[in-house]
Image (spheres, rainbow, N blue to C red):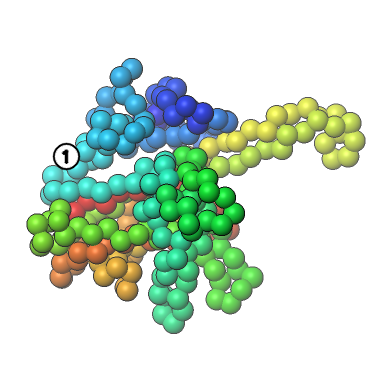
Amino acid sequence: MRVVGELARNNVLQVEKTPEIGESTPFNGKYPLAIPPFMNVDIDENDYILPTDGGDIYSKMYANMLAHFVMYDNVMFNPLMTDSDMDDLDPTGTFFDDPDTFESRAQFGRGTDVSLYTASPLTGVAHASVALLPSNKTTTPQRDGLLITNTMDITTLTSGAGAREFMVYWKIYQFETTVDARSGLGVYANQNTPSLRKIIEIDPEPSGFQAYISLDDGASWHPIGHLEPVAFCSAGFEVRLAFRNSSDVKYYIETYGIMF
């Protein structure tokens, strides 16, 4: 199931079935909130998108996900919708892949700390616009798209015990935009077509995309699969996630969450 939100007012426009992989839909002025097909989340006229306060759609979805996977006690998630959500991403984060260390290389909005931004004091982000950039293969080594989260300290949630078992969820898309053309000359001669932003439903683990988890605040990274359980020999307390794109296309991340 896919909930469709309106960019201008952040209200629910409609609820529709999840499109097939590869299907594209014009999505100007709208954004998606995907509900995984194995979950039973009822949406009615009283449901809302913002604020993220426990009663919103994302909170309901992740609570349902936690109830579905009963082996986990906690879930932390990021809807990637507001300036405070951007605070959970680390633009200065690094990723060590022996023998090289890579810096964050992604597209996302400004967080709440305006002192970090000299060009403008404005903060925020448009939903479903956080993106992993295509890999830059003109350098050696190549610079992949890379999004790294800030530290998630799970000490309190686990009563000081940390966690050894995790499961990570994410939802990604591709978008394509057509040209706004009205001309009597050149390549667009005799055309009068609007610009359409189309959303494309894709597999959660497409070619060139890889997710990672760190239990030691980014010192080391371990590959993980989409909604696949992973267990470690020792407990972790300072958890981070990283998403990497070695492909030639741009991947947009709608949301991510981690259960433990």
Q: In the image, what residue occupies the spot 82% across and 36% down? A: 188
Rendered location of residue 89, percent (x, y) = 40, 56
In the displayed structure, 164 sits above or below 25; it is below
Direction from residue 164 to residue 90 in the image, left or right: right
Q: Circle 1 sits on which residue?
A: 67
- The residue at the point 53 percent across, 49 percent down is 121
Position of residue 190 in the picture relative to residue 79 (left or right): right
Helix, strand or loop for disc 1: helix
- The residue closer to the viewer here, 172 or 28, is 28
Which quadrant of the figure contains the C terminus? bottom left
Question: Looking at the picture, how far across and down is residue 56, in whole percent?
Answer: 30, 31
User: Does residue 16 appear anywhere in the picture?
Assistant: no
Q: Classify residue 79 as left or right of residue 186.
A: left
* In this view, 54 is above or below 246: above
Quadrant assignment, res 156: bottom left
Q: Is residue 259 visible?
A: yes
**Who's the residue at 44% across and 50% down the image?**
111
Q: Could you say which quadrant of the image residue 4 lies in?
A: top left
Is 234 situated above or below 172?
Answer: below
Image x and y of residue 21, in percent: 46, 40
Compared with residue 258, is residue 43 higher up or lower down, i.e. above or below?
Answer: above
Residue 120 picture location, percent across and down: 57, 50
